[in-house]
Amino acid sequence: MIEVPPITLVNGCVRRLGRVSLRIPFRLLAYYQDWANGNIMGVAIRRPGSTTWERYKLSISGINVAPGGANGVDPSAVELSDGRIRLFWMQRLAGARIYSATSQVGAANGIVFTYDGGFAFESATEIYDPTVVQTANGWAMWADIGGTTAYATSTNGVNFTAQPANSAFPSSAVFPWGATRVSANDIRVIASVRGPGGADGVLFRSTDGGASFTEIGRGAIPATAGGDVGISYNAATGMWYQLISERM
């Protein structure tokens, strides 16, 4: 049984609750989109031994993520093997693209980032809500393009290449909300399955390092929860976490 203590972050109206990430020494970082405070990208941090959250506006040098009308949105974060954090987000700069930036180990890790340059992935139309996870052979990204799920992979975690539409899942109707790597080959995804017979809060598991996923359960979120649920796993404690938005 998966133990999932709910984490609810609401400040006026948080439009999109991003991703949950566990960081050494077991800080809990929750990335989100704060519509009520100027549509900024933020992170809430719960430190070891604390039950309260500290909230920060993300700082990304080398790129303007708040030019007005083209703000960076939809953050998704991944911890690298050396403890740094890489952030992905969507922004309309010279096209609809997913960009990335990387933080450095230290007190500001996960809060202050440096733009990686270029862009991670792009679409000829609109693109939103990236979910990124490291796999056995590199990286995987899923994003929403006009109500369909785009799937892309990368070997360096910076530049992604489109793959056949959602080919890692049993159905093209699956739209990943969040993903976490349990071990080298074990990856979990929480998703929405769109269309007839679909549902929110559907859990998928890959045991081959992200090459394919199988549905393992439904009803993983409360009935009152909104979409874009984040998920994370702490291998040291065996604890699972969700980041859940509130419907408003």
Image: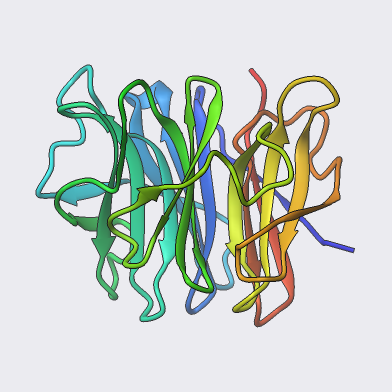
Q: Is residue 211 visible?
A: yes
What colouring method underlies this structural image?
Answer: rainbow
Please, is residue 160 above or below residue 164 in the view? below
117 to the left or right of 231: left
Outermost residue on the right side: it is 1
State the residue at coordinates (54%, 38%): 165
Please, is residue 241 above or below residue 14 in the view? below
Counting every numbered tag in the picture gives 0
For the residue pair 143 and 16, the one nearer the viewer reads as: 143
For the residue pair 55 and 225, the one nearer the viewer reads as: 225
State the residue at coordinates (82%, 61%): 3
Outermost residue on the front side: it is 164
- Residue 211: % across, % down: 61, 62
Please, is residue 112 above or below residue 170 in the view? below
The quadrant holding residue 177 is top right
- Residue 18: % across, % down: 50, 42
178 to the left or right of 5: left
State the residue at coordinates (74%, 60%): 205
- Residue 120: % across, % down: 29, 48
Q: Is residue 11 visible?
A: no
Please, is residue 79 above or below residue 131 in the view? below
124 to the left or right of 163: left
144 to the left or right of 112: right
State the residue at coordinates (59%, 78%): 184
